[in-house]
Amino acid sequence: MPEEDLQEAAELVANAKYLIALTGAGVSKESNVPTFRGEDGLWRNYNAMELATPAAFANDPKLVWEWYIWRQGLIAECEPNPGHLTLAKWEETGLLKSLITQNVDGLHRRAGSSNVLEVHGNLWALKCLSCDYHGRLSAPAEGIPECPDCDSMLRPNVVWFGESLDSEVMARVYAELEKATVCLVIGTSGVVQPAAMFPIMVKQRGGTIIEFNVEESRLTRSVDYHIQGPSGETLPALDSLI
Ligand code: BJW
Ligand code: ZN
């Protein structure tokens, strides 16, 4: 990464009128949370993309729950990394106005961020398949959890392919996108909609996009700055220039 790019990006971040960030699985990679695509996205012989669908759950809820229980166990052992911590610091100092995350791992909140919009839900949240019950796990589930109100199966309250994102969360996201003048895009492949459109919407309104990724993504050709490298290193490096 050219040193001047990092310096220019640091100036943009420091002077931004309204700075927001969109994060994906890559920001948690250095906390040992597997990403979704490529080799990382394999569990047993299943591809994460095949499991994260309503059809997979309808077909084999036990299998899909086993995948989530494995991920819950893994994430319970993970700690936020310097990338999460830098974003939390920027919120605390008033620099970062809001953090939109596709991640369900809860690591941004554990790092101290509070203005977090979890557009794909949370791994510890539950909802009933039959009634309005919503709940929360404090430890990995054991088997398929049952609804305390109606005995139906519970499912993780996350967003699978083909499902709509929560309308209240989305209203808040769109309000942030309208205000944003600079959008950081950190550790996402940019292939999943509608999240991949969020930075583009900021750009269309005249804003600037700064990407942090170990490689080029589907969004790279649309960004103003591409800061190459692991975000657990590049975000603190940029912070040190502010
Ligand atoms: C590092 C790093 C380091 C590594 N430092 N970087 C328009 C066009 C085409 C299709 C659609 C469309 N609109 C909707 C769709 C369908 C679909 C979709 O987008 N499909 C595409 C795949 C083609 N979208 C949906 O279905 C969405 N719903 C919706 O739009 O409803 C309305 C509608 C429905 C149907 C039709 C039309 C409209 C819902 C999407 C839900 C996604 N859910 C998941 C699972 C969540 C639950 C769970 O976790 O179990 O969300 S899938 C998975 O992908 C997960 C992630 O949040 C999401 C994004 O992945 P992410 O974060 O980008 O991770 P990776 O692994 O892809 O990338 C990691 C990146 O990090 C890489 O770039 C690495 O290089 C980088 N990296 N180490 C920095 N150290
Ligand atoms: Zn119920």
Image (cartoon, rainbow, N blue to C red):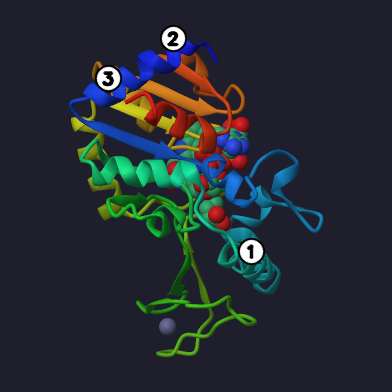
Residue at 81% x, 55% y: name it: 45
Q: Which sits in the foreground, 150 or 219?
A: 219
- Mark 2 vs mark 1, CA separation in Å: 38 Å
Give the residue type that dot 3 points to.
Answer: Gly
| Residue located beneath label 2 in the image | 4
| Residue located beneath label 3 in the image | 207
Q: Is mark 1 on a helix, strand or loop?
A: helix
The quarter in which the N terminus is drawn is: top right
- The earlier-in-sequence mark between 2 and 3 is 2
Neighbour class for label 1 at 10 Å: few (<14), some, many (≥20)?
some
Q: What element carries label 3?
A: loop
| Residue located beneath label 1 in the image | 74
- Nearer the observer, disc 3 or disc 1? 1
Is residue 75 placed above or below 188 in the rendered structure? below
Is residue 186 placed above or below 141 in the rendered structure? above
Q: Which sits in the foreground, 128 or 215?
A: 215
Residue at 39% x, 37% y: name it: 22
Q: Position of residue 63 (x, y in %)?
A: 71, 69
